[in-house]
Image: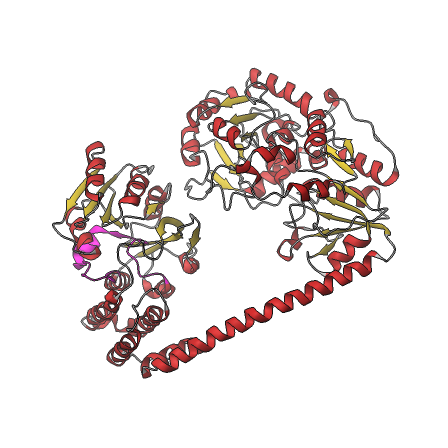
Amino acid sequence: MPRFSVIVPAYKVQAYLHECLESVLSQSCPELELIVVDDGSPDACGAIAEEFAARDPRVGVVRLERNEGLGPARNAGMARAAGDYLLFLDGDDTLTPGALAAIADRLKETGEPDVLVHDHAHTLCTGETVRDRAAVQLTEQGPAPFRLEDRPGLLRLPTAAWNKVCRREFVEERGFAFPSGSCADIPWTWPVLTTAESIATLDRVCVHHRQRRRGSAPHPPGRRHFDVFEQYDRVFAFVDARPELAVWRPALFRRMIDDLVTVFTRPDRLPPGTRAEFLRTARLHYRRHRTPGTPAGLRARMRHTVVRLGLYRTCRALRWVSNLRRGAAAAAAGPARALRSAALRLHYRVQLRLPLRENRAVFAAYGGRGYGCHPGALEQAFRTHAPHIRTAWIARPEHHHTVPSATRRISPGTAAHWTALARSKYLVSNDGFDRRLVKRPGQILVQTQHGTPLKHMGLDLRERPAASGDIDFDALLKDVDTWDYVLSANRHSTLTWQRVYPGSFKTLAYGSPRNDVFQQATSADVARLRESLGIPEGSVAILYAPTHRDYRRTQRSALDLDRVVGRLGPRFVVLARAHPRHGGPLAAGTTSPRVIDVTDHPSVEALCLASDALVTDYSSIMFDYAGLDRPIVVHTEDREAYEAARGTYFDLRDFPPGAVARSEDELIDIFATGHWRGSRSAQLRTAFRARFCPYDDGRAAERVVRHVVFGEPGMPPVVPLEERHPVPSAAAALGRSPLASVQQSTGPLTVTDRL
């Protein structure tokens, strides 16, 4: 008997059905059956379903002679179902990777409830996914399973069958079935939730529900939305036949009014000329099912009043007034923004005429995202080695908490921001300041860059349209003309920066300031970091940090992290760190507790210190990590595609920092056999470290400050590579193998504010 029966009605979804069925069959949970119901579809849906059934015994096909609609098609699938639990997908929806395994784990954890409600995300025609706003109701905190009266907030969730998993015996015992009609989910959802003896929630996106463009859906807008009245009649008939459910009448009545108002106000639901009729029918249903209970909030009361009185003209007037107000606000916002911008420009011009402040320095990183990277290390070095200079950091308000308390916080686009740019002597950034910046005589601008370049940068992107995007190369060269100093960690970086950013700047080949912490941290710091990240004692922590893919519109992990940790065994943990341009957590969709998402962690240096090994692809993090002298594994599964789109300055296979994996299976084998920390990998890492980390001795930031502020080039001298002692990994600090247990410590982290 399969664990899950996944039922997929198919009608005019031939363009999406392949993806839908593949998303089910590729799940890591093999105990399933997939029942595809060809609902009399005139396109190739039936043929596609038969193709899948021919090559996979888990697929069954049910054919209906004519189009019956979503409800009867689902019923036909349920008649064939044999699984413990029923799942419903529309033919253009998809299951997210690992969804069934996560559902199975949650069902087991909560004692096999009657219903499990999980989250979903809407997939727009652009490929963007948007999580449902009501997801807060799916919190897993608190007792589970429970009854609906313990979590009435679940009534706010969409009335959909595809965001619920139902125990088949529960459905059969209660005789639940879908009615005909376009709103068939309504009389399924409410009876199921109100009668379930046990309910659980899963706060995880398990389904991507496709939002079709207007005109491309199989059922265009029309009178079919009048079906909502008949379906709510069924709901109240069900409740009225069961006195014990009377307590739910007020909530269901309020939900009915909300749904009716939604249908009425949405421009894509009702055909022209039918809105007055719809509102008259809504008024009748209001009177028929009215239940005592005052709706909360002014807007809710207004909705009820409009429906109760059938105020069609009033509703049209309110919509007209609302649209007018929005239009007026938008029209007023333009001149207001223009006036504010003009005032700020005038303010900046005035500040440019005032004396330069010799004791001020302003810093920024990643376009205002927060404190960190090389500018963060330099800001700290300014306060340590040049305490007479007052520092300020430019960051958006939501990132102000990342800035040390000793540093002034400035929001971009404010008068304080333009004052700092106009009057601070030292300007330090890894990205760039506002393009309207006027470089004054006496100002010193330090461009730190992001790290050692492997992928093409600067002017080299002119021949890479997939990677260059909307880069204005003329503006880029103007920005280069403002640079006084550019940081470099090695000879390769020096030669690259001077070629791809041609300018008169001076290169400071002093090392990577952000990596100073690798030489300054202690084993106790490493142990505290691992404890704060939740790394289990005795685990081998692998930091997985891939870079951005310019040739992909939608970013995704190249590795099935659940599979990786499952194959490696319980002693391995993966710290998954997404690139800032990834658009979301790298571990989205994973279910294993040994995959820890660290995308939002403020310090990548702290993650490097906490890990025992690095897995990356083309990211510059490998050059930083090499300074730690810890194992590095490079995963280059899509090398040809990446190099065609972005280009690299050298072939990693010719000069790698460690073992190279060309596939996920090779990567797993490298760790399973111990090759990741073998003698050959150590030899490769030693050569890589000598080439790319010649100056990373823990005092790079100090050398930069002494040169820029005090005119002391090359001070202090660089410590030779063989005399450096970067902090070892947690296990190595105790003189044990990486598989040994790690002694945890307590107390505050003392190495640096940046961690």
- Up the image or down, 679 lies above or below 279; here it is above
Q: Quadrant for the N terminus, please.
A: top left
Tell whether position 169 is magenta. Answer: yes
Is the stretch drawn in magenta largely helix, strand or loop?
Answer: loop
Q: Quadrant for the C terminus, please.
A: top right
How far across and how far down the image is residue 697, in percent?
74, 29
Nearer to me, 475 or 237: 475
Give the residue at x 22% y 44%: 45
How far across and how far down the image is residue 395, in percent?
67, 53
- Up the image or down, 400 lies above or below 608; here it is below
Side of 176 where 546 appears, left or right:
right
Most extreme residue toward the bottom is: 309
Most extreme residue toward the front is: 474
- Up the image or down, 383 lies above or below 614; here it is below
**Which quarter of the picture shows residue 4?**
top left
Residue span colored magenta = 157-185
Answer yes or no: is residue 743 visible: no
Nearer to me, 256 or 123: 123
Nearer to me, 750 or 325: 325
- Up the image or down, 93 lies above or below 181; here it is above
Nearer to me, 101 or 718: 718
